[in-house]
Every structure is written in structure tokens, then in C-alpha cells.
Amino acid sequence: MPKTRRCRYPNCHAMVAFPDHYCQQHYEHEAEYLASRQRWARSNDKQYTHKYNTVTRYRNEDKRQQYNFYRTRQWSHLRQQVLERDHYLCAYCKVQGVITPAKIVDHVIPIEFDKALKANVDNLAVICSKCHRAKTDWEQKYYGTGNGNTLKDVEPISDVKMIATMMKG
């Protein structure tokens, strides 16, 4: 007798032969389920994460030092201080009149551009993920930060309102 199990579709009690996970009626979900299992397995694969951390993330010594800073006690205290100061609200949305909860703390002037401002509380602001993506794209164009780019000789901008306006346009 072949091994069987219940269909994974909610409230479906049909029995399915191994190695399938869904019955004939819900079989269209099989490919999606298998893809999600592969994604999970890849994200929990030690070799994959090790390769990501050593090859992709730490592509040079500057980046290694930059990422190591985010693991220090100093950064966690600074981060908590800024989150409480800004009441967990995105500073970039707030200057546009929108209240958005956020938990990311970002350097207003990127570390790559000015390493001296790395631990300066006045250079830190709370930012939501949507604004963070937009700001990262803007920083790459304006400052020349990011992988494969060269830093530009431009005037640093520390005004959140001005950056928010420039990010939109």
C-alpha cells in the first residue's frame, strides 16, 4: 500500500499519495508550495548564508568594518536612543505630513561618504522601509555610494526635509 497523507489545502481532508502535497482538486498549489520550501531551505542553508556573508556582504575591507560597526554595543545603544527620540516614526514621511511607524535607523549622511559621522546621534534618523529604499537610490546617485560606484565630490546634505524633497524628484 502506498504512503499517503492529507492534502495541505485548508479544510480539505482528501488523501494524497506521496510525494504530492495536494489532491487533484487543489493541485495548482503544488508548484507554489514546492518553491516556498526551496526558498526556506536555501535561506536556512549554512553554506549559502556563509557564502553571502563572506563573499557578497564583505566584498572589501571598508564594507567589513562598516557591517561590523552595526554589531557593536555602541550601535545598539545609539539606535535605541534615536528610536526613542523620534518616537518610532519615519522622519522623512513626517516632514511630508505623513505619520508612518518605523524601526530602521539610518545615517542622514552615509558612512561611506563621511566616516567621522558614523556614531553621531545628530546624523541618525528613523526611516521606514519605503523611504529607506528611495533614500538608498538617491544616495547612490547623489553621493556615489554603493557597490561599483565611486564617491563624488559633493556638498553633504544633513537636512532631512531637503533630502525628502530630493528623493521624490
Image (cartoon, rainbow, N blue to C red):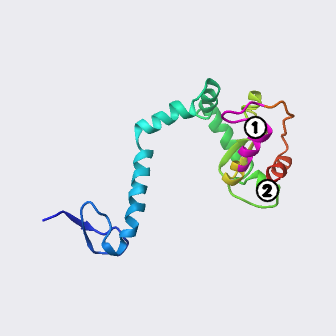
Residue 45 percent across, percent down from the top left: 40, 41
Q: Residue at x 83, y 53 (%)?
A: 169
Tell me, yes or no, whether the highlighted magenta stretch contains residue 141. Answer: yes
**Separation of residues labelled 2 and 1 (CA atoms):** 19 Å
Tell me if residue 88 comes above or below residue 67 in the rendering. Answer: below
Mark 2 or mark 1: name the one nearer the start of the chain.
2
Q: Residue 43 sits in which quadrant?
A: top left
Looking at the image, the residue that sits furthest to the top is 61
Residue 81 percent across, percent down from the top left: 70, 42
Q: Which mark is residue 73?
A: none
Q: Which amino acid, by three-letter code, is at mark 1? A: Val
Q: Which amino acid, by three-letter code, is at mark 2? A: Lys
Tell me if residue 11 comes above or below residue 79 in the rendering. Answer: below
Residue 105 percent across, percent down from the top left: 68, 44
Quick one: 120 or 51, which is closer to the camera?
51
Q: Residue at x 62, y 35 (%)?
A: 70
Tell me where the magenta segment starts and ends, as one range.
134-151
Name the residue beneath numbered marker 1.
Answer: 121
Name the residue beneath numbered marker 2.
Answer: 94
Looking at the image, the residue that sits furthest to the left is 1
Tell me if residue 86 comes above or below residue 52 in the rendering. Answer: below
Q: Secondary structure at mark 1?
A: helix
Tell me, yes or no, whether the highlighted magenta stretch contains residue 149. Answer: yes
Quick one: 27 or 153, which is closer to the camera?
27
Q: Is residue 65 left or right of residue 141?
A: left
Q: Residue at x 85, y 33 (%)?
A: 154
Total of numbered circles in the picture?
2
Tell me if residue 129 comes above or below residue 32 in the rendering. Answer: above
| Pointer 2 local density, CA inside 10 Å: few below 14, some 14–19, many at least 20 | some
